[in-house]
Amino acid sequence: MKIGEMKIGKMKTRIVTVVLAVGILGVLAVAQDTMKKDAPPKPAAGPSQVLLESWNDIGRKLIAMAEDFPEDKYDFKPAPAQRSFAEQLLHAANANYYFTNPVLGLKPPAGEDPKREQYKTKAAVVEFVKKAFADGAAAIKQKGDKGMSDLVVDPFANQQTRVSDMAWGLLEHSGEHYGQLVVYYRVAGLVPPESRPRK
């Protein structure tokens, strides 16, 4: 057998091996998909679990922004009449206590916006945002599914409301501020963490 024929023979063997491997992987993938379709669907998560996952997700996004945004731009405002980046974070985080405190039988915060002077550094703002979301998550866990329909007084409307409804309202509020902070990033010439390519 000549050297050229040996090389061609090895090449054919490699091609056949690759084709077989791809075929086997394809069969395994189809089998896996079939098993998933044949398996009964997972049961729905409980209402407190769904709420907790959403609460933690928006908290994660705001915390990521708080940790990521340059400290020298923390007092940046897209327009003079708006809150600064730091003030936006403080406002969004503090609003959580209008949910957490009534749920835990405590008085709501005295004011909507903590003063920037109380949280002079980036580290202090980050810590406050983390704590506000952790405290809310703890309150949701404490209430559990059974406590989602408990009644608390909404301090803004002076009306009774369900724990779950109040929490979802605060989640929407956090989402609104997250959207505003995305704009702060863009106006400052930066890319928000959630918009960056995944590694």
Image: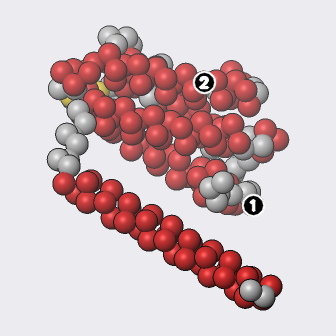
Q: Which mark is residue 128?
A: 2
* Residue at left offset 69%, top offset 37%: 67
Where on the picture, by quarter, is residue 16?
bottom right
* Residue at left offset 36%, top offset 32%: 52
Q: Residue furthest top?
A: 105
Q: Nearer the viewer, residue 126 or 188?
A: 126
* Residue 91 appears anywhere in the view: yes
Q: Residues within 10 Å of mark 2 (few under 14, many from 20)?
A: some
Q: Nearer the viewer, residue 3 or 34?
A: 3
Do labels 2 and 1 touch, CB within 8 Å? no
* Residue at left offset 32%, top offset 35%: 51
Q: Is residue 115 left or right of residue 170?
A: right
Q: Nearer the viewer, residue 53 or 149?
A: 53
Q: Which mark is residue 122?
A: none
Where on the picture, by quarter, is residue 44?
top left
| Label 2 to label 1: alpha-carbon separation | 26 Å
Q: Position of residue 103 (x, y in %)?
A: 31, 18
N-terminal-most mark, 2 or 1: 2
Q: Position of residue 187 (x, y in %)?
A: 69, 60
Q: Residues within 10 Å of mark 1 (few under 14, many from 20)?
A: few
What kind of residue is marked 1?
Answer: Gly
What kind of residue is marked 2?
Answer: Phe
Q: Is residue 13 left or right of residue 98?
A: right
Q: Is residue 34 above or below residue 55?
A: below
Q: Position of residue 90 (x, y in %)?
A: 59, 32
* Residue at left offset 74%, top offset 86%: 1
Q: Is residue 157 above or below residue 42?
A: above
Element type at mark 1: loop
Q: Is residue 187 left or right of residue 102?
A: right
Which residue in the protein does label 1 denote?
189
